[in-house]
Image (spheres, coloured by chain):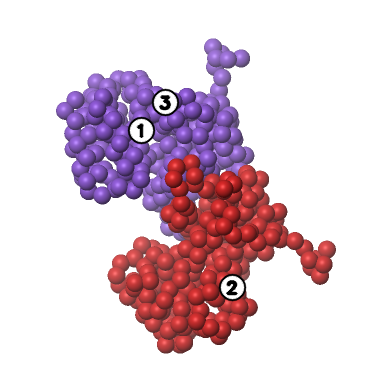
Chain colours: A red, B purple
Amino acid sequence: MSAPKTVGILGGMGHAAAIDLMARIHRLTPRTREQDGIRLIVDSNPATPDGNDALLRGGPSPAPMLAAMARGLETRGAEFVAMASSTAHAFQFDIERAIGVPFVSMIEEAGAALAARAPGPGTTIGLLAAEGCLHSGLYQSELARRGLSSVVPEGAARDEFMDLLHAIGAGDTGPRSTRRLAGVGARLARDGATLLLAACTEASLVLTPETAPAPLIDAMEVLAVAVVDYALGRRALPPPFAWTETGPA
Amino acid sequence: MSAPKTVGILGGMGHAAAIDLMARIHRLTPRTREQDGIRLIVDSNPATPDGNDALLRGGPSPAPMLAAMARGLETRGAEFVAMASSTAHAFQFDIERAIGVPFVSMIEEAGAALAARAPGPGTTIGLLAAEGCLHSGLYQSELARRGLSSVVPEGAARDEFMDLLHAIGAGDTGPRSTRRLAGVGARLARDGATLLLAACTEASLVLTPETAPAPLIDAMEVLAVAVVDYALGRRALPPPFAWTETGPA
C-alpha cells in the first residue's frame, strides 16, 4: 500500500468541530502501528466570521479567510481539503477556486450516502441543521440533484428547533435535549421523512441512531468515512476545481 | 483584551495526542461567543519516526521532521509552538533552533507545576512515562534543576509497567488496567513519591486523581493550561531560542 494522503482540515466553526472530525478519522483509521495513521494538517480558527450571521443577516463573509486558510493547508502539504462545518459549505466555491487540490465536500458526501441508503427515488430526508445552513438550501439542492426530497422544521417549530440548538451549543446536552430533538425529528417523520440527516454538531451531540425516531445519518461521520477512504486510496478523489469553458475567463 | 495568540501544535506521536491536547485547550478556554476561542494550527503526523525507537534502539531520529513541521506552523502564523508528546521533547532543542517563535515545553511546564505543588525542596515525584522518556531522563533532570527528586519503575516492575502501557495503548482501558497502574503508582509511593506525574497518554487515559494512590498531576493538562494562559496573555511567553555567546557560532 502506498503512503496515506495528507489531509487538510478547516475548522473552528465552532471550535470543537475540528476536534470532533479528527477523533472520528482517528477512530475509523485501521492501524497496526501508531505510525500507520493519516497525517492531518489542521487550521482551527474561531475568528472566522460566523457563516450563519453572513447568510442570514448580511454579516461579514468568512469566504476570504476560509480561502486563505485552505491555501495555507495546501502550501503545508495537504493533498486534499475537507471542512468541519456544514454551514460554511455555502462558501465552498470560494475555497475550491483558491486551491489546486481537491476539496471533499461534506454536502456532496452526505448526499451520496443518503442516496445510497434511500429505499428509492423521491425518498424524503428530514434535515436537522443550523439556520444558515437550512436557509442557504445547501442540502436541499444537493438532495434535489439526486432525485431526493427534503423537509425542514418550519414556522414556530423552526424557531423552537433553533432555540434548542442554541441551548445544546451552550452545554445543555442532557436527556431533556435528546427528547426535544427527537420530537423535532418525529415531526419531520410525520411530514414524510423516512431518513434523518444530522448536519450540525449540536444534533450529533444529543441524537444517536438509538434515540432518533427514524433512521439517522450523521454528516460529520459520513465526511470522516470519506476522508479515510480517500486518504488510504480506497476511493479515487474528486478532481480539483477547474474553470470550465463556459465559466469565468 | 487583545486577540488571542495563534498556537502551533505538533502531534501524531501517538496520533490521538493532538486531539487530546486540543480538547483540553477547548475545555479550558473561556468564551461567550464561539468566535472567542483560540486559533490552533496543527500538524498531526503519525509518520514521524518513533521517538522511543530512536532513543532506545538507535532508530531514525524524528528531529529533522519535527523541525520542518514546526517551521511550517510558524510560517502559517503560529505565535508559539507546543508539542503533544513528552518523549518527543528529547528533540526539543532541534525544534527550538528551527523556529523564531517561542517553544512552550511540556517538560518545563510540568516541572514548574510540580515545584509549585510540592510541599518542600527535596520532594520526590513518581514518574509514569514511556520507556524512551524515562530513559532520556527528561523529567528527572528538569526536576533535579528545581531541587526535586524523582523515582521511576525499575527492573521487573519497569518491564511490567511498559507491558501495561502497551496494553492500554492497544485499547485495554478498563478497570483492570486502572488497578494495575494504581499498583505501579503505589510502588512509587512506597519508594518515597508524594506526588505522581502522568506523563504519557496511556497513564492519563486510565488513572485519574480519584483512582491514583497519591496526588496526581497530568503533564498534558498542565501543558493545556499553559497554552491557554499564554494565548490569552495571562502569562508572558518564554523568549524564543537564541544562540548564546558561549554557544555555537
In this image, B169 relative to B196: left or right? right
Residue A47: horizontal and vertical position, in percent? Answer: 54, 54
**Residue A49 image-quadrant placement:** bottom right
- Label of residue B130 in the image: 1
Q: Residue furthest front?
A: A1
Which residue type carries mark 3?
Answer: Leu
User: Which residue is labeled 3 in the image?
Assistant: B56
> Badge 3 sits on which subunit?
B
Between circles 1 and 2, the one closer to the viewer is 1
Q: Does residue B120 sit above or below B3 in this rendering?
A: above
Q: Chain of mark 2?
A: A
Residue beneath disc 2? A138
The answer for how far apart the CA atoms under marks 1 and 2 are is: 47 Å
Residue farthest toward the top in the current orientation of the protein: B246
Q: Position of residue A78 (x, y in %)?
A: 62, 49
Q: Residue at x 43, y 73 (%)?
A: A216
What label does residue A100 carry, if any? none
